[in-house]
Every structure is written in structure tokens, then in C-alpha cells.
């Protein structure tokens, strides 16, 4: 398999973030939500997409061609 520096960086950052929260994904999600709310309260624009069901997600993913 080929090394991809972008994918490697994403994995590294993910590991760093999880380590910061002791591997607790829920704590990480709460921190992201807290920071998002703080940004909104400070008047910053926060872009959010409406939630999708797993079925909608799968249909959307299936309709897009694979890159490469």
C-alpha cells in the first residue's frame, strides 16, 4: 500500500486528540460541541449540515464515483 502524507497526518492528529481525552470519544465530542457553541456565542459563522440517516448517507456515497 502506498503512503499518503495527508492520510498519515489525519491518523496522527486523531491519535493525538484521543490521547488528550484519554481515549474517550464522547469526551472529545463534548469538547468539539463546547468549542462550536463558544464560536457561535462569539459571533463566528459555524457551518453545519442537517443530519442524515444512515440510509441517506449510504445512498449519497453510492452515487459518487470513487476517486483515483
Image (spheres, grey):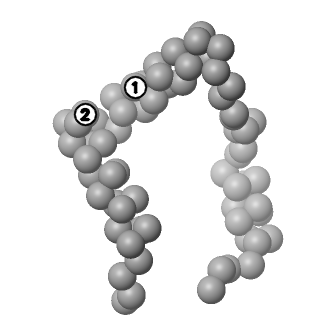
User: Which residue does the image show at 67% across and 80% down from the upper left?
Assistant: 66
> In this image, 10 relative to 33: left or right?
left
Residue 5, given in percent of the width and then of the height, sits at 38, 72
Label 2 Cα crowd, 10 Å radius (few <14 / some 14-19 / many 20+): some
User: Which residue does the image show at 71% across and 65% down from the upper left?
Assistant: 61
Residue 52, given in percent of the width and then of the height, sits at 72, 44
Residue extending furthest right? 63
Q: Mark 1 points at which residue?
A: 31
> Which secondary structure, mark 2?
loop
The image quadrant that residue 25 belongs to is: top left
Q: Kindly check if marks 1 and 2 are in contact, taking CB atoms under 8 A apart as contact.
A: yes
Q: How many marks?
A: 2
> In this image, 40 relative to 20: left or right?
right
> In this image, 45 relative to 27: left or right?
right
Q: Mark 2 points at which residue?
A: 21
Q: Can residue 45 be seen in this view?
A: yes
Residue 3, given in percent of the width and then of the height, sits at 36, 82
Residue extending furthest top? 41
User: Which residue does the image show at 47% across and 22% down from the upper left?
Assistant: 35
Where, quadrant-wise, is the C terminus in this rendering? Answer: bottom right
Residue 11, given in percent of the width and then of the height, sits at 34, 60
The image quadrant that residue 51 belongs to is: top right
User: In the image, is residue 18 above or below residue 11?
Assistant: above
User: In the image, is residue 41 above or below residue 39?
Assistant: above
User: Which residue does the image show at 72% across and 38% down from the upper left?
Assistant: 49
Mark pair 1, 2: CA separation: 9 Å
Q: Is residue 37 visible?
A: no
> Which secondary structure, mark 1?
helix
Marks 1 and 2, the one that precedes in the sequence: 2
Amino acid at each position: 500500500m502506498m503512503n499518503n502524507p495527508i492520510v498519515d497526518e489525519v491518523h496522527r492528529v486523531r491519535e493525538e486528540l484521543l490521547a488528550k481525552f484519554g481515549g474517550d470519544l464522547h469526551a472529545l465530542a463534548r469538547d468539539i460541541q463546547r468549542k462550536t457553541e463558544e464560536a457561535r456565542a462569539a459571533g463566528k459563522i459555524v457551518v453545519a449540515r442537517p443530519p442524515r440517516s444512515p440510509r441517506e448517507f449510504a445512498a449519497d456515497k453510492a452515487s459518487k464515483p470513487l476517486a483515483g
